[in-house]
Image (cartoon, helix red, strand yellow):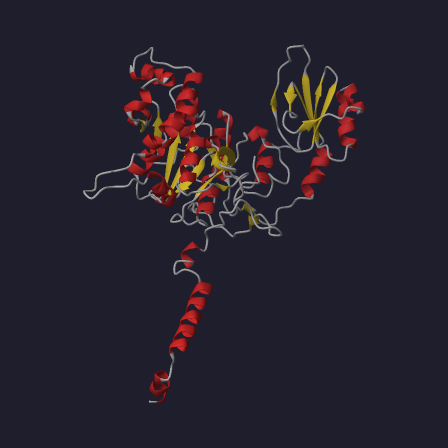
Amino acid sequence: MPMLTASRRITVPGLVLFALIVLSVLSLRGPPNARLLSHTPSFSSSPPENEPDYWTWDTVSRFRPSPSGAPAKDACAAFPTELLSRVQVVLKIGASEPRDRIETQLATVTRCISNLIIVSDRDEQIQSHHAHDVIGSLPVSYHINNTDFDAYETLSRNTQQSKIDGAQGWRLDRFKFLPMVERAYEINPSAKWFVFLESDTFLFWDNLFRLLDHYNPDAPVYMGSPSPGSRDKDETTWFAYGGAGFVISTAAVQKLVHRESGPYGEYTSPSLSERYEDMVRGDCCGDSVLGWALYQAGVKLTGLWPMFNPHALHGIPFDDAYWCQPVITLHKSLLKDLEGLSEFALKWNRKEPILYSDLLDYLQLGTFSQRTEWDNGDWGGWQEPDSPGHASMEACKAACHDHPTCLQYTYDSSGHCVFVGTVRLGGAKKALPDGSRLSSGWDVQKIAAWRKARECEKPLWMKPSITRIF
């Protein structure tokens, strides 16, 4: 009875005060589903000041261990195929692309993706896969007064002469992005993640699955390598560069393709492709339009460069930005790199994710000192005007060794020494039009010291940022 008696003496002001206290406590606890979003990263443009821009997550491989402990001869024996119903992979190709590149992609990177969706600019059977002509699903209005669709009309004739060149294929490519997302969601609406890549994209599946384990697919997430897109008043928007691959959560896709409906269930708003027809016509690039459409749907880019990387393997400038970070994608991959990296990933022990520092080992950088008809300085190289290194190849080598930040160099036989402050493979370069030749060198001693000072204690899983860009 004492408790009942006390409750009768509570006044109206007392009830108000009690309600305010309860509301304050609930606000401190957060929303009921806060625990479900505990692994969802911040969507701010960059991490707060004085905080590291990475997480040091402990991750676990989703790949199955080989019974003997050695890599299986069957390339897909250890692949976690059970994830494919939830992680839908979409490969975008075009009729103008080299067929050997598409076939190499299917034989390497996407060889274990049994439910792979291929989207293209014409219907065809490629090995065991059907390529979906997503341009054919666009409204008829796209064809009207659109010279870029002349190439599509050529392909539609489906004859031996139905071929288009690379420039025509590139102009047609931008029309695939929006219907590509629509088609992927239509085919597999139960997927939790949609992964989009191109025929020259290399993707490290083990690293990607480790990453996705730390993100919530029921939150609107759109991740990739940031590129500046359309402006919204005074704000620059960002999109994921298509060649480096990108990932969209089911929540983000649903916001993107959502259509209003009327009292009878009839659609009262246009489809995604219809809404952005004018923009696709006027923009050069479909990935830019897709990023804008997501932005307008309330989904901002989760920028994850350098893990999603526009560089080709031979172009990676290894430095602190490309070292302890897990590598998820590479772009403009050569056929030999698609094959070689696939074998490298297959033999990896998967106790830890593959880091950029591991790719330096794969390339054997630091084990050779010179290559002729080669250029390793066409990215990030510079010349010292008064350097004695311009006199000869040997002088360039000595000058680089004496320079505090030079790790490698390229010498132009016309008398130019280029210093490079990163470790980079570069590529073959034949004689220039004026007859001069390029030769490259690597300071093996300095590279070894540079590397020794950079032991990776933990993988650095980069936090989302649109200020840390390619």
* Of 237 and 420, the residue lying toward us: 237
263 sits left or right of 248 in the view: left
Tell me the quadrant of the picture where the C terminus can be found.
top right
Q: Residue furthest bottom?
A: 1
Q: How many marks?
A: 0
Q: Nearer the viewer, residue 437 or 302?
A: 302
Q: Estimate the x, y position of residue 51 in percent, counting from the top left.
A: 60, 52
Residue 251, percent from left and from top: 37, 45
Indicate whether 16 appears above or below 310. Answer: below
Name the residue nearer the viewer: 249 or 80: 249
Quarter containing the N terminus? bottom left
Q: Is residue 333 left or right of residue 116?
A: right
Residue 157 sits in which quadrant? Answer: top left
Q: Residue 209 appears in which quarter of the rendering?
A: top left
Answer whether residue 84 is visible to the viewer in this image.
no
**Residue at image location 40% in from the left, 36% down from the top:** 293
Q: Position of residue 257 (x, y in %)?
A: 33, 38
Q: Position of residue 85 (x, y in %)?
A: 33, 43
Residue nearer the viewer, 123 or 232: 232
Q: With respect to residue 29, does 400 lie above or below?
A: above
* Residue 350 visible at all: yes
Q: Is residue 19 above or below residue 439?
A: below
Give left or right: position of 44 versus 450. left
- Extreme-left residue of the structure: 264
The relative height of residue 374 versus residue 194 in the rendered view (above or below) is above
